[in-house]
Amino acid sequence: MKEGLNRDADNRNKSTTPGVIYKDLYILGSTVGEGPGPAAPGYIRAFDVRSGAVVWTFHTIPLPGEPGYETWPPEAWKKSGGANSWGGITMDEERGVVYCGTGSAAYDHWGGDRIGQNLYANCVLALDAATGVKIWHYQVVHHDIWDYDIPCAPNLVQVQKDGKLIDAVAQPTKMGHLFILDRDTGTPVFPVEEVPVPQSDIPGEVSWPTQPMPPISLRYTRQGFYEHEITDLNDEATTFVKDQIKHMTMGDLFRPPNRDSALIMPQFNGGTDWGGAAYDPFNRKLYVNASNEAEWISMFEAPKNESILQFDLGAKIYQTQCTFCHGSAGQQLQNAHSFSTLKTIAGQRTDDNLREVLSTGKGLMPKFDWLSDGEKNAIIAFLKDKGKDLSIDLSKISVNFANNIPWLATGHNPIKDNEGYPINKRPWGTLSAIDMDSGTIDWQVALGTYPSLEAQGFEATGTFNLGGPLVTAGGLVFIAATMDERFRAFDKDTGEMLWEFQLDAGGYATPATFEVDGKQYLIIAAGGGGIPGTPPGNAYYCFSL
Ligand code: HEC
């Protein structure tokens, strides 16, 4: 997977999502870096199932002479990374077409070195499965500076219009926008408008003037953050949140990350994330879960030519390179690789051990061999709580941790009320049934609860959720995904909850159903850990009727 990427991608290209099989081909996307460091391009490739040879490659960052090349600076194909399909690929066997959603281009939050529309990042792509030739593309975010990757595979759906059935694909997004596109042409089945959006004031950035917006009836989450969104759980929470955010800015979706601290809703994990949606071909409804929570972000200038404490340099490098996977210092992640766990590990290792992990990588952790020794030492000082009085002259070490990216984001910063609940009004998580024929939400219910709030009489507040739904021919929608770590069944016609089961850890996955000897089973992976504050687990739960 590391070959044929136009650069030494080494261990920066891997896949965390399975591909699809078409005849003798295994068609696969990839997971690549999104930080300011070096990143691999997210090419989509077909491998011969027998020999492993690459049969075709679709360049999601086009090479000179390929269409879309003009939407990047001339040298981008050699340097820019991302535009990868990490959320899964959908196969239409009958047509011999694969539909893929792609993520944003790297770096996630500053695109001054990739000025342009950046095709085929943030696109739904229809590719000929036998040859990899593009049939059409549809971009859902132009020149993304929010990390609004397409996070899941599109669904094959049908829309009844004027008495005729149209084959379409439905693509849920982190923005809570559902795009329904004609399967043969990529044309939106319901009109999409290009809406002017606020522009970036970060030096070097050239944000895109407009963004595509589907009809209001196909926007299934809160859109933007406003004063009237502030939590009304109780007076204390409202007062606390008002005070917390008094210096932050708020407003519409698609405000660019700037120097101010901006509240963003939906936050950078969506909306919808990796779980995607379930489609029922009998009633032509799409079932999709989503989160409504805010996060804040701001941009800062990469330090250069100044003197800085070693510890502070380490903190800055950590913030820009490591928080994607290990969480920020303030975040109470309980997964195995959280910041607090890293501090414990660092305390038990010699500096040489840690330098080696950074130089070579380990398992799914990429290597950071391109950091200078001074920078590696600074990270180690930060993890070991040392170097708080040791000043270093940045002109003496090569400040390449930002890979010449002059503006960096403070990361995706969670923000909560005085008791740790989200700062906005409920519901914090939803499950929606969306009618394909009318392009409207048929029903929407809160998904998940906080037991602590349930005890105070707040029912079904909804929680942040990760993992998707499954709809059965028998009329049930099964979904876990919530922070209360329960697994539920809903009536597919009404949204009424019919059953719930307490798991030992979060079921942040999509359930599956299968049959053995005439008996139907339902299974879910409860791995937990993916949402801050919920512990890891390691079990599959299997149910029979
Ligand atoms: C793409 C995700 C990712 C990024 C980015 C990342 N790590 Fe990791 N890191 C991991 C994973 C996964 C492991 C567990 C590796 C294993 O044990 O297989 C890990 C393990 C570690 C360990 C423990 C190694 C050991 O010896 O057990 C340290 C220390 C560490 N990371 C530090 C960092 C630092 C510092 C950064 C930023 C410069 C960073 N990581 C960036 C994913 C990441």
Image: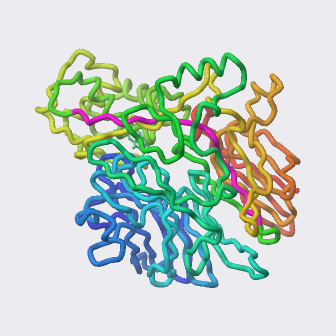
| Residue depicted at 53% across the width and 28% down the height | 332
User: What range is drawn magenta here?
Assistant: 285-303
Residue 243 visible to an observer of this rendering: yes
Q: Position of residue 444 (x, y in %)?
A: 77, 49
Considering the image in quadrants, where does the N terminus appear?
bottom left
Q: What residue do we see at 65% from left, 20% from top?
A: 237
331 or 257: which is nearer to us? 257
Residue toward you, 37 or 137: 137
In the image, is residue 536 above or below residue 64? above
What is the x, y in percent for residue 38?
Answer: 29, 52
Q: Is residue 50 left or right of residue 191?
A: left
Image quarter (top left, top right, bottom left or bottom right) of the C terminus: bottom right
- Can residue 505 be seen here? The reply is no
Q: Position of residue 178 (x, y in %)?
A: 63, 60
Residue at 50%, 82% in the rendered image:
128
From the image, give the main secondary structure of the stretch colored magenta: strand
Tell which quarter ligand 1 is in. Answer: top left
Determine if the magenta segment contains residue 118.
no
State the residue lying farthest toward the left.
396
- Residue occupying the far front of the picture: 196
The answer to whether residue 425 is above or below residue 433 is above
